[in-house]
Amino acid sequence: MADVLRATAMFWGDGEQEGENPQDFMNGLKLAFMQKAAAVDEANKIKTFLLKLKVGSMAKEWFNGLKATEKDTWAHLQTAFEERWPEKTAPAKTREEKQTELKQAVLKEGQLGKKEKVNGVDEWSHIAWADRVQQLAGAIPDTHGLLIGETREKMPTVLRRLINAEHITWLTFCDAVRKISLTKLCKAIEFESRLVTKDDLERVQLQTPSKGLARAMQSTTLGPRIAQPNFQPAPFQAQLQPAAPMGLLNNPNRLLLMQSFRPDAERLPDLVRLALPIHPNTAAGRVLYMAQIVAYLAMSNGRGPNEFRPHPLSPGTNPVTSGECWTCGFTGHMRAACVGTPIPQLEQKWRSLAASIKSWATAAASSMNLVEAGADGGGEFVS
C-alpha cells in the first residue's frame, strides 16, 4: 500500500489547488490498485483513499460527514465521490470559434529555426506549427481547404516563399511545411538577411514587380521631410572648418555644395534629427531595410550620404556616433581589430562622416567654452 500512497498526490477538493483535478485523483488511485501484484481488498482501498485526503481539507471534512452506508464499500465510496465532484465537460465550440483559433495560430518571423516543447519533446517551430494548424483545420472541419490561402498569407515571408499557393488540402499544405529541411530553411533565412549592396539591389529590382517595389518604398520610414537649411555665419567656428573653394558662389549647385562647409555644430543637430530608424535583424526588419536602400538610391542619385541624406543602417547594428566600428557597425572593439562582417561601403563612409561631424562639433564647443571662460573670469585660453 505504500507504493499506492506515493503514486498520487494529496487531494484537497476545494478547487483552489493548482493543477488538481478530482477525476485525475481518483483515476490515479485506480491505476495504482491495478498495478499491484496482488489484488487490493475493499478495506485497504478505502483506507488508502482516506490517507490521501489532506488533513483539514474540504475533502477530509466531506469524508467525515458521509453516512456509514456511503463508505462501507469501495463502490459506494466511488458513487459518493462522483456525486460530490462530478466530471466537468467543456462546452462544444462553435464553427466560428474554431475558425478564430485557426486564424490566431500564427508563426512569427523570430520563431523560425528554433525549437519548442510539444508534449515534452523538442520540435522545430515550423513543424509544430504545421501539426497544430492541421489539427485546428480538421476540427472545423475545413474539408475543402478554403482557409489555406488566408493561413499561408500570415506565414513568415521566408516560409511563404518556400510554400507555393497551389495546395488545396490541409494535408498536402501542412506536409509541404513539415518537409522543409532545416538546411533549406536556414539558407532561405540567410538569403533574406544578407546585406544588400547596390549590385544586389539592381538584381532584386529586376525580379521584383514594380507595384511591390512601390509599396515597399511607400511603407519605408526615411525620416521627416527635410527643410531648407538656414545658413548663419559663425565667425569663431568658421575658423575650425575648411574654407570653401573659390568660385563656390558662382556654382549653380552652390546650395548643395555649401552643406559640406557648414559649421559642424550646425550639422550635428540635423544629423540627430534626421537619423533613420534601425530595423531589427529579423526577416521583416531586413525587408524594411531593403526598402530603405531602394528609397535612398532613388533619392541620392549617385551622391554620397550626409546629414540631410543619411545612409540606411544595417539591421541590428548600433547607431552612428555611438563609438561603433565603421567596418561592421557594432561597438566593443576598434576598427583595426574588427573581425565582423563588413557593412556596405557607403554605410561605412556615412558612419565615418557622422563621427567626424560629432568630433568637430564637440571640439568647437569646448574651444568656445574656454574662450568665454577667459573673457569673463580671467581664465586662460588653451589652443
Image (cartoon, rainbow, N blue to C red):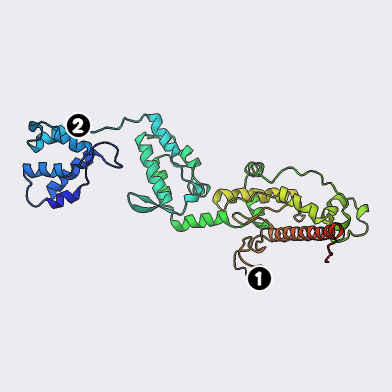
State which tag comes first along the sequence, 2 or 1.
2
Q: Nearer the viewer, residue 114 or 364?
A: 364
Q: Nearer the viewer, residue 329 or 80?
A: 80
Q: Residue at x 29, y 42 (%)?
A: 19
Q: Residue at x 63, y 70 (%)?
A: 337
Q: Residue at x 80, y 58 (%)?
A: 369
Q: Position of residue 329 (x, y in %)?
A: 64, 60
Q: Residues within 10 Å of mark 2 (few under 14, many from 20)?
A: few
Q: Residue at x 41, y 36 (%)?
A: 101
Residue 77 visible, this angle: yes
Q: Nearer the viewer, residue 69 or 202?
A: 69
Q: Position of residue 263 (x, y in %)?
A: 83, 55
Is residue 88 placed above or below 304 in the rendered structure?
Answer: above
Q: Residues within 10 Å of mark 1 (few under 14, many from 20)?
A: few
Rendered image quadrant of residue 144: top left
Q: Amino acid at mark 2?
A: Arg
- Would you say 303 lies left or right of 70 here? right
Q: Secondary structure at mark 2?
A: helix
Q: Which quadrant: the C terminus? A: bottom right
Mark 2 and mark 1 in contact? Answer it, CB < 8 Å. Answer: no
Q: CA distance from mark 2 to mark 1?
A: 76 Å
- Would you say 347 lies left or right of 382 here? left
Rendered image quadrant of residue 143: top left
The circle on residue 84 is: 2
Q: Position of residue 113 (x, y in %)?
A: 46, 54
Residue 307 visible, this angle: no
Name of the residue lying farthest toward the bottom:
336
- Would you say 339 lies left or right of 297 here? left
The circle on residue 336 is: 1
